Image (cartoon, rainbow, N blue to C red):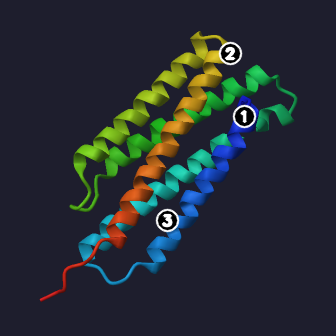
Amino acid sequence: MLSEAELLPTLAEISVVFAGFASLISVIAGGSSREKIAANLWRLRGMLETSVLTLMFSLAPFLPAKFGYSSETSWRMAAVVFSVAIIARVAYKICIRNQPSLINPIAAWSIGLLQLLGALLLLSSTFWLPFEMVVGAYHLLLLLVLLVSAYLFVRVAVSVLAPTEPEP
């Protein structure tokens, strides 16, 4: 069984793989309609953002420990920063609202609300729950963000690999 410290680099590696494959798929993609390209770029950007978030915050609990903080303090500091980063990202996505028409608004709102709920749960657990629960909530939010990245990766792959209708 992986310990909490061994699981984080594994999550970071998975997020980098998603980012790499999605970038490769988007480069290989053939001609598509302008709207389909815009939707795929929106998904790709979201997937890259979530992959980078997973990568950064998979390694974040190790940084304060390098400066002499205890393991518990390192995890709690990383949890607060991670929660604030997710809340800020979701708030930004809600404010810009310039998603292409091919993006399903129900899926976009569901993803945003799930991430917001996870971030709020992590933030509240940081101050009130025992250390082990904070670590568990941190991992849960990391997995949620990674699942969002995987979902967007699959949507990009399916959209690119789907047959296109010939233009009239």
Q: Is residue 75 visible?
A: yes
Q: Mark 3 against mark 2, which lies toward the viewer?
A: 3
Q: Residue at x 38, y 34 (%)?
A: 114
User: Is label 3 in contact with label 2 (beta carbons under 8 Å)?
Assistant: no
User: Is label 2 in contact with label 1 (beta carbons under 8 Å)?
Assistant: no
Dot 3 or dot 2: first in sequence order is 3
Asked if residue 66 lies left or right of residue 117, the reply is right
Dot 2 or dot 1: first in sequence order is 1
Q: How far from the left and from the top, in percent, is residue 104?
A: 24, 52
User: Is label 3 in contact with label 1 (beta carbons under 8 Å)?
Assistant: no
Q: Residue at x 26, y 62 (%)?
A: 100
Which residue is the site of mark 2? 131
Q: Which mark is residue 61?
A: 1
Which residue is the site of mark 3? 22
Query: How far is the residue under mark 2 from the one under mark 1?
Result: 13 Å
Position of the C terminus by quadrant = bottom left
Q: Residue at x 61, y 17 (%)?
A: 133
Position of the N terminus by quadrant = top right
Q: Is residue 21 above or below residue 46?
A: below
Asked if residue 59 lies left or right of residue 134, the reply is right
Tag 3's secondary structure? helix
Q: Amino acid at mark 2?
A: Phe
Query: How far is the residue under mark 3 from the one under mark 1?
Result: 27 Å
Q: How far from the left and from the top, in percent, is residue 120?
A: 46, 25
Please rate how many residues cluster around mark 1, counting C-alpha atoms within 10 Å: few if below 14, some from 14 to 19, many from 20: many
Asked if residue 109 lies left or right of residue 76, the reply is left
Q: Amino acid at mark 3?
A: Ala
Q: How far from the left and from the top, in percent, is residue 56?
A: 65, 46
